[in-house]
Amino acid sequence: MGIVEEFKQFVARGNVIDMAVGVIVGLAFGQIVSSLVSDVLMPPIGLLIGGVDFSELMIVLREAENGVAAVTINYGIFIKRVVDFLIIAMVVFAAIKMIARLQHKKETAPAEPPAPSNEEKLLAEIRDLLKSK
């Protein structure tokens, strides 16, 4: 079998397609969370702690000089990324817990007893008739 055929079989598997969809949705979700943190959460937090813009929080190790850019440690951006990570981690944790709970319910759901067979129904009728006499 040629490499092209093997690749076609690999891509045609459901797991690969599911994984690709998950990666695409995950990337989009990451961008949404980044926007939420940068544009919605951090500005009010910065305002509460004294009008701080987190993207401008940095430690300057060397000033810019002679056309060479400054050397900085951008800890404000790091704080935003940590908040991004925490939100994404919480959502993933909640999703995994919900999926586990759904799977657990499927496993522990008691099976319905089978319907009585015709012989059992007939024997029950005979029993009831004998009791009534």
Image (cartoon, rainbow, N blue to C red):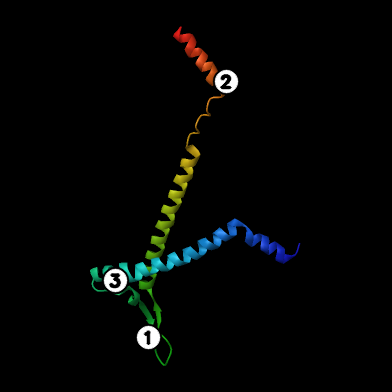
> Where, by quadrant of the figure, is residue 87 drawn?
bottom left
Q: Type of residue at label 1?
A: Glu
Q: Quick check: can you spot residue 81? A: no
Left or right side of 3 for 26 = left
Secondary structure found at label 2: helix
According to the image, label 2 marks what residue?
Answer: 119
Residue 57, position as x, y percentages in the image: 33, 75
Residue 43: mark in rendering? 3
Seen at 35% across and 75% down, the residue is 55
Residue 30, position as x, y percentages in the image: 43, 66
Seen at 35% across and 72% down, the residue is 76
Secondary structure found at label 3: helix
**Marks 3,1: beta carbons within 8 A:** no
According to the image, label 1 marks what residue?
Answer: 63
Q: Type of residue at label 3?
A: Pro
Residue 77, position as x, y percentages in the image: 38, 72
Residue 54, position as x, y percentages in the image: 32, 73
